[in-house]
């Protein structure tokens, strides 16, 4: 069979949420959306991710030759390739979909959404667990409305490394980084009050997704199977967010032009993919 045409019209992704879903997200800091992708869309996403990861090789970040994957504990947590939208045309189309931006904006109650960075989080066979952590403290902006999507490209189970969340932690999380390493429970040294809480597991069928707030504590189990667990994710920044002084994924030439407090609105780095009243970047 020949390779499918990515430009064929496909059923749109789910872009409408109920008031109950939005309220649940804001209460617990995450939500799972079943059957987010149609079967045809799922195959498009799988093929684009596999192709772009192969094309990237060992380079983790677009535009950087020095960041290479190796055999550290962290490299054995997952295969992580960042900003695939920058160097693969189909990934660009998928990641810049305004429908996903609308979902993120609706969940967080903001007017506009920019891409912070996309990334694959592929747990290879027998991969290490992902320690409990918060996302936004790593990034170059600090916002209570930072949000990420996590799309399951394979069935995600308790055995192969599904996500776990601490409900409500987004209302208490702070912007200082508490690290992520080999110790699964390191975060509880910073947030001891969370250590007695019950985590919520989020197994998903392939094609489903979750959204979570940038201050929601989450982690993932190890992959205890001989197969891969593929996930494609993207972190989003509310339009109007400002630079907090941290480099994270920003390139050196852009970083040199910024000072804390500057608005991060350069579309070549952080494209505006959805706004209720402004024109946005076209995929």
Image (cartoon, helix red, strand yellow):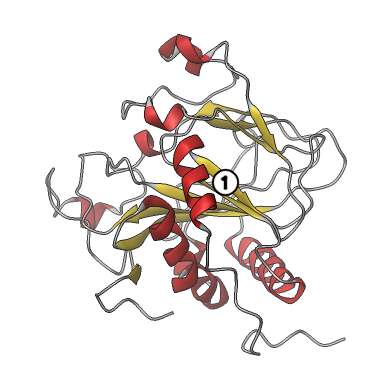
User: Circle 1 sits on which residue?
Assistant: 31
Considering depth in this image, is 78 or 96 the residue closer to the camera? 96
Can residue 123 be seen here? The reply is: yes
Considering depth in this image, is 100 or 25 the residue closer to the camera? 25
Q: Residues within 10 Å of mark 1 (few under 14, many from 20)?
A: many
Element under disc 1: strand
Q: At which x and y percent is residue 154?
A: 77, 54
Can residue 152 be seen here? The reply is: no
How many numbered tags mark residues here? 1
Q: At which x and y percent is residue 3?
A: 77, 84
Considering depth in this image, is 61 or 89 the residue closer to the camera? 89
Q: Quadrant of residue 115?
A: bottom left
Q: Is residue 3 left or right of residue 77?
A: right
For the point 41% across and 34% down, which residue is it? 215
Q: At which x and y percent is residue 10?
A: 66, 83
For the point 19% across and 49% down, which residue is it? 242
On-image quarter of the C terminus: bottom left
Q: Is residue 32 left or right of residue 68?
A: right
Considering depth in this image, is 110 or 134 the residue closer to the camera? 110
Q: Quadrant of residue 282?
A: bottom left
For the point 38% across and 38% down, which residue is it? 136
Q: Is residue 235 left or right of residue 7?
A: left
Q: Is residue 63 above or below residue 259?
A: below
Q: Is residue 140 left or right of residue 225?
A: left
Q: Is residue 161 above or below residue 186?
A: below
On-image quarter of the N terminus: bottom right
Q: Is residue 51 above or below residue 256?
A: below
Residue at the extreme front of the image, as rendered: 20
Q: At which x and y percent is residue 17?
A: 53, 61
For the point 21% across and 56% down, which residue is it? 240
């Amino acid at each position: 069979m020949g390779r499918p045409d990515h430009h064929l019209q496909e059923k749109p992704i789910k872009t409408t949420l109920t008031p109950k879903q939005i309220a649940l997200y804001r209460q617990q800091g995450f939500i799972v959306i079943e059957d987010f992708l149609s079967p045809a869309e799922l195959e498009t996403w799988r093929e684009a991710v596999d192709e772009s990861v192969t094309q990237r090789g060992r380079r983790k970040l677009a535009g950087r030759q020095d960041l290479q994957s190796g055999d550290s504990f962290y490299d054995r947590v997952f295969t992580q390739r960042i900003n695939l939208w920058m160097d693969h045309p189909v990934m660009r189309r998928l990641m810049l979909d305004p429908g996903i931006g609308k979902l993120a904006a609706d969940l967080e109650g903001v007017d506009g959404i920019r891409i912070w960075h996309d990334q694959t989080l592929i747990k290879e066979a027998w991969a290490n667990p992902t320690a409990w952590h918060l996302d936004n403290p790593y990034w170059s902006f600090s916002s209570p409305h930072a949000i990420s999507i996590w799309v399951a490209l394979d069935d995600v189970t308790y055995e192969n490394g599904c996500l776990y969340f601490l409900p409500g932690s987004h209302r208490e999380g702070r912007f200082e980084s508490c690290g992520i390493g080999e110790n699964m429970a390191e975060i509880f040294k910073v947030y001891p009050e969370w250590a007695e809480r019950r985590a919520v597991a989020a197994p998903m069928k392939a094609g489903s997704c979750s959204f979570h707030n940038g201050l929601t504590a989450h982690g993932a189990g190890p992959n205890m199977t001989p197969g891969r667990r593929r996930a494609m994710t993207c972190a989003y920044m509310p339009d109007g967010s400002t630079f907090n002084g941290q480099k994270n994924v920003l390139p050196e030439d852009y970083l040199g032009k910024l000072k804390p407090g500057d608005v991060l609105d350069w579309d070549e780095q952080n494209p505006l993919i959805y706004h209720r009243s402004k024109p946005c970047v076209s995929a």
